Image (spheres, rainbow, N blue to C red):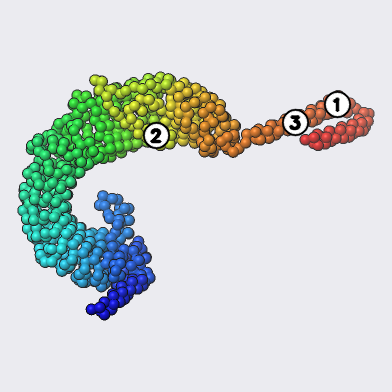
Amino acid sequence: MGGRTPLLVLTFSLAVLSIKLGISHGCRETERKALIDFKRGLHDPSNRLSSWVGEDCCAWEGVGCSNISGHVIKLDLRNSRRMDPYEDCSHQEVYYLSGFMGRVPAQLGNLSTLQHLDLSWNDLHGFFPDSVTKLTSLKALDLSGSVFQDGFMQVTHISNLCKLQILCLSSVPINDVLANLEMVFSGCLRNSMEELDLSGTQLSGSFPDWLGNIKNLKSLDLSSNSLCGSVPASIGNLSLLQHLSLGSNDLNGTISKGIGQLKSLVDLDLHENSLSLSEDDLANLSSLEYLDISYNFIELNKSDDWIPPFQLQSLSMDFCQPKPHFPKWLRTQPTLDELYLSNAGIKEAFPNWLPSGLRYLYLSDNKITVRNLEGLQLYENNLSRVIPNCWKTSSNLLLLDLSSNKLVGGVPDSLCNLQMLESLHLSHNNLSGQIPHCLKSCTELATLDLGHNNFIGNIPTWIGESLLYLKTLSLRSNAFTGSIPQLSSLPSLRILDLSNNNLSGTIPQSFGDFNALKSAPTYQCCYFNNDSLYVEDMWLFIKGSELEYTTRQLSMDTLIDLSNNYLSGNIPEELGNLHGLRSLNLSKNYLIGQIPWSIGRMKQLEVLDLSRNNLSGAIPSDLAALNFLNHLNLSYNNLSGRIPNGNQLQTFTDSSIYAGNPNLCGPPLTKNCTLNIAKAGEEEQNEDSSKSRMETLWLYTSITLGFIIGFWAICGSLLLQQTWRTSYFRAIDNMFDKLYVMMVVTVAKYKRKL
């Protein structure tokens, strides 16, 4: 034995060395050739297999090799751009062009060591090759989305793959009765299969008992087929089952007690059937986290004291038939993240006990009342569709916040029935159309936030005429057109945001008449009529970023934002009357003229942004008096002269706030005002001296010409006499010669001086 030990060690070492050498030279040659043949059988419009060159096929895209043997064990060629049937044609074209087309090559069977094969969501067709039966090491096979001409045969090919654990044939048109597949799964697959996806495969017939024999099954998806009848009790034999999806079938009757025995079940999907279900059927499902029983005849609120054994994260009960009340057992689900109760026949008031951690809440098409509510906040709940048109005049609702959802359509007229409404938040949705005229009847409104939608038309004039209690008006990021209406009659308005629209015309001079902005703001709590406090939140764009403001911040802040429109004309000097304004943003418009000196009287101003306009002239030195100013932007205008310094302006060291004004000078810019002013003075002095000398020259020239003209006038009559004619011309020639010489000498002298 002692002599054999070194020999065994040497043999083992050589074996390991040979394996390492084999790996260093790339994959096995026979498998490399099989992959090349496989590639030739496919049409690759996106050139995904461009890396399939060279000797080392283990480095090719989608190919995985064993670190020990060097054999190809994984081939992942799925089309990652899975097509959504609701996407437009341009997106579908991207889907097709990113996948493979053609038949599955027979050379596939030469990869005998393959363990994982994924060809899903490609445009594969023709006959599925018999050679797949050679892949005896296969553990996972995904052919979802393929269309094979032999229909049922591609399933029978896999019956002898005794190591197969995962089989996905979603959307492959098998088009057969589910019971006929028993011969496939009655052999060795019955013991190996753990995940089976036959969704959307056009299966029909009743739910067979033999499925209960696949004892190791952890996931079963038979959704989107035409299965009928009831679910047999044999389903209870799948004690390891964690995911069961039977949605979108024609199942009916009561749920068998077998489902109630699936203690490991985490996800149960029964939507779009005609099933009945009670609390007793779920009594043992302690691991359940996702439950979808929508579009059934299921009632899960028979007993007000029922305490479920599970803690759900998602519950869908759309189009079920519960009592006209919110299920009381939802109180016991603090982990609930998604709740779908659309069209569920609910007719009671909205409860205040729903789980606080809810992120997605769907309640459309119910008859939920808000009679006893003063505040309804459903922001950031992924609400979709249109705003329900069911608001009653009798409601005591004071606060309605539906912001940051996915609401579409217009504002329903019934919303105007909320005559006591003080705060309306509909921002960050996809609402469209014009602001309904009937909102003028909501005269108690203090906050109207419609920003970040698709509203069109002019800003209604009745806002400034009827909503006299308005404190906050935000219409930012819509598609409003026309001029800014008269709003200065709103005595309490402190936040006005009309930015990011298509407004034109001038800034009204009356903007200097906002009474609430003429003095420093004081803190005011927001209360309901019965003195109960409510908290509201709102997004404001300040200092270059959008921030969420709470009730206290909103009560203290004052803001006017007209940026990113098509406003023109001068900045009204009357804005200087707004001594309590904290933020003024007029950037990205077409404003002209000088910056009004009166802005220096706005002592509370913290933010001033006049960038990207056509303003000209000097920066008023009065801005130095703004002691609270901490954000200034005057870039990209036509401003000129020295940048004022002193007080708060000395703290602005970022030169970019003055960029795009080539005629500005002084700190923080590098352009020196002293040299430029001295040079400009010298040029002005030279210009004045030259001008003086030219004026003197023209004076002498004028005198000379005047003399000639006067002399010609005096002597003109003598020219008519014959006796004088000869003497005259001789004398005038002599005189002209002398005058000409004098003018030439004078002009030459002044040219030298110039």
Q: Position of residue 549 (x, y in %)?
A: 35, 31
Question: Residue 208: percent from the left, percent from the top?
Answer: 8, 58
**Which residue corresponds to the image point at 33% horizontal and 67% vertical from the top-left?**
58
Residue 541 - label: 2
Residue under pointer 1: 711
Q: Earlier in the sequence, mark 1 or mark 3?
A: 3
CB contact under 8 Å: marks 3 and 2: no
Q: CA distance from mark 1 to mark 3?
A: 33 Å
Callout in the foreground (1, 2)? 2
Q: Amino acid at mark 2?
A: Phe
Figure disc tally: 3
Q: Is residue 381 above or below residue 171?
A: above
Front one among 637 and 710 = 637
Q: Can residue 275 be seen?
A: no
Residue 643 visible, this angle: yes
Viewport quadrant of the N terminus: bottom left
The image quarter containing residue 334 is top left
Q: What label does residue 689 carry, if any? A: 3
The type of residue carrying mark 1 is Phe
Residue drawn at the location 35% of the way across and 67% of the way down: 52
Judge whether 193 appears above or below 130 on screen: above
| Residue sticking out furthest to the bottom | 3
